[in-house]
Image (tube, rainbow, N blue to C red):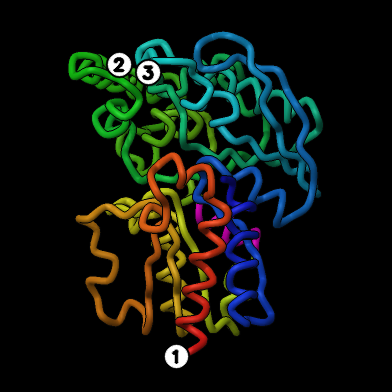
Amino acid sequence: MTAPQAAAAMRSGIKRAGATGVAVLPLADGGEGTLDALLSARGGSARPVKVTGPTGRQVTASLGILPGSVAVVESAQAAGISLVDGANDALQATSRGVGELIAAAQRGGAREIIVGVGGTACTDGGLPALDALGWSLAGLKVTVACDVTATFVEAATTFAPQKGATEAQVALLERRLERLALLYQQRCGTDIAHLPGAGAAGGLAGGLAAIGAELVPGFEVVAEATRLDQMLEDAEIVLTGEGRLDAASLEGKVVGNVIELAREYAVAHCGVIVGRVDPNVELAPDVELAPDIAVSDLMGRAFDEEDAFTRAELLTEEAALDLGRRFLAG
């Protein structure tokens, strides 16, 4: 279920509960869904581009074209873990296709490029992507929307295991990234070793930063594009969500940021709809986080995991209906 699909289901549910003046804003944090969220917010179109996929085979990726000569590159379109059939080769997965997408955007006349990073199969420090770009952004303004704050070398220890790396492979990848950080400093004059966010997309963010890209929190990029703050000024209820609610959800991800903004703008009620909830997560350790926060998980409504996936949109609508009734009654 995409962010626009989830948002539409939430809208249907809360409108059934009697809510009026409902606005829909698909959001993302720089990972998967960023392209759809920005196209929905700003208008524009997507065009197919053939690039090198994470396994080295050619794939067709979508390149977003926004008004004002702005392009959107979603790294998962070219190097996503979802593009790998079977087990991922953590040592060989490549980010080259991301560089090819950026180059295609430049050839198409883009002067500014937003690169969403997240959901990739690679831990190569962005070296193949830089090779595809000729180690130059050629005057382009490139903003990298990061979904994590990990430093460059932490990409190996923190995220490579999630991409199929064994303990021995993690150690090897860590050494590779350490050497690569030195290479970037020597060749580009940029020290990215301790730069927050440089570890995003297996170090791809750090590689792009080495040749002049700016790293920013991905949620901020999308929130600004959607003018989320203006929407929250008069809102009484906010609904948000994601696939799995865990500790990471509250650290730079969409859910945590929306909750923080709901508190900042004194929104009365905040509903969080998720696929499942980590039993160890503490959503509101601070009682002042928001006056009323409620969580609804789809697994609690489904017969099993397969049913939750199959009926995700319907279950999301039902969750929004129940939350809406609760909030409007209060």
Q: Which residue lies under the disc numbered 2?
A: 176
Residue neighbourhood size for the residue with mark 2, other residues' Cα within 10 Å, grouped as few (<14), some (14–19), many (≥20)? some
Instruction: Name the dominant secondary structure of the magenta segment.
Output: helix
Give coordinates of residue 60: x percent, y percent: 68, 21
Query: Mark 3 and mark 2: span between their CA atoms?
Result: 10 Å
Q: Residue at x 41, y 58 (%)?
A: 301
Please name the amino acid that badge 1 sits on. Answer: Gly
Q: Which residue lies under the disc numbered 3?
A: 183
Query: Mark 1 and mark 2: span between their CA atoms?
Result: 56 Å
Give coordinates of residue 232: x percent, y percent: 57, 77
First in sequence: mark 3 vs mark 1: 3
Q: Residue at x 60, y 84 (%)?
A: 234
> Quadrant of the image for the C terminus?
bottom left
Tell me where the magenta segment starts and ends, as one range: 219-226
- Extreme front residue here? 303
Q: Which residue lies under the disc numbered 1?
A: 330
> Quadrant of the image for the N terminus?
top right
Q: Secondary structure at mark 1?
A: loop
Rendered view: 130 above or below 311: above
Q: Secondary structure at mark 3?
A: helix
**Would residue 221 be counted in the magenta stretch?**
yes
